[in-house]
Amino acid sequence: MALINENAARRSGPAVREIYDALRHRILTADLMPGTGMSEVPYSEQFGVSRTPVREVFRRLADEGLLRIVPQVGTFVAPIQLRAVYDSQFVRETLECRTVTLAAANAGGRARDDLEDFLTLQRRAIRDSDLQRFFDADDKMHTYLIGVAGYPSIWELIQGVKAQLDRVRYLSLESGDWLNRIFEQHELIVKRVIEGDATGAETAMREHLQSVFLTIERLANNKPELFEGSLGPHVSNASKS
């Protein structure tokens, strides 16, 4: 019996990480939509573990605001928290608008080639209607720009606060027209960085990052059940611009 328990304990450690990564990804990518009921049993069977590691994952995701555990009722995918979206957007805009000016000052020939490669990856993802590839290439480009600025660890700070924002980003990418608009914004950012135009790069980055407010307004009006909280002044300002 002791050996069985020991083996189960060994499995549960990696299992928690595997289950956590899988469920978190499904929530962020809107594969599991807000309001979806969650049960420990199906996931314990799917991953071949007891309910204990699944329960631990549920608690971790609840701590992140991605699940909502209601005693005596059940566990559900949490709505998108607008306050958290605005907070993470503020962090991104503050940090990335500063670092892109440094990237424009530091970018050399190698950076020019690499940034063009990122645009090529995005262009192909749009052609193939592959949202995940586009999203990955999008993040990699932003990460790269921060690295060119000389502050690569800043992306880790951004990653730590942008879960709710990513949920909005994934929902927005369902529109093919929106993909093209984001790509055009990326092209302009890259153009300004390659030209060494720090002011132009900052302006292009700010406009790009603030476009999420229009996305929030559109989604919140069309699917209010997905969100919790009120639309901020950022949205009305974006609508007027």
Image (cartoon, rainbow, N blue to C red):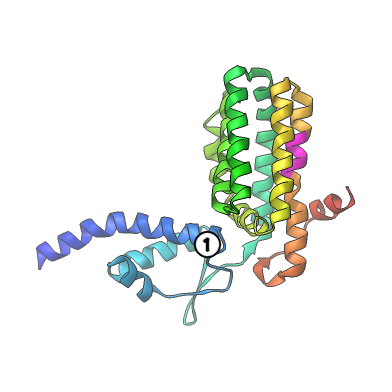
Mark 1 secondary-structure assignment: helix
Query: Which quadrant, please, contains the N terminus?
Result: bottom left
Q: Is 152 displayed left or right of 185 in the figure?
A: left
Residue 12 highlighted magenta (yes or no):
no
Residue type at mark 1? Ile
**Residue at figure coordinates x 85%, y 50% from the top left:** 237
Q: Is residue 73 left or right of residue 111?
A: left
Q: Residue at x 56, y 35 (%)?
A: 143
Residue 17 coordinates in the image, percent (x, y): 36, 54
Magenta range is 204-209
At 71% from the left and 48% from the top, the residue drawn is 180
Coordinates of residue 159 in the picture (x, y in percent): 54, 44
User: Up-down: is 5 above or below 74?
Assistant: above
Task: Classify 10 Å Cα crowding around label 1: few (below 14), some (14-19), many (20 and above).
Answer: many
Q: Quadrant of residue 5?
A: bottom left
Q: Residue at the front extreme?
A: 127
For residue 147, above or below residue 66: above
In magenta stretch: residue 205: yes
Residue at 68%, 18% in the rendered image: 105
Residue indicated by mark 1: 27
Residue 4 x/y as whole percent = 13, 65
Q: Main secondary structure of the magenta part?
A: helix
Residue 86's spot in the image, x, y percent?
70, 51
Query: What is the quadrant of residue 102 in the picture?
Result: top right
59 displayed left or right of 84: left
Residue 182: tell me if it is visible: yes
Task: Decide if residue 145 is in sight here.
Answer: no
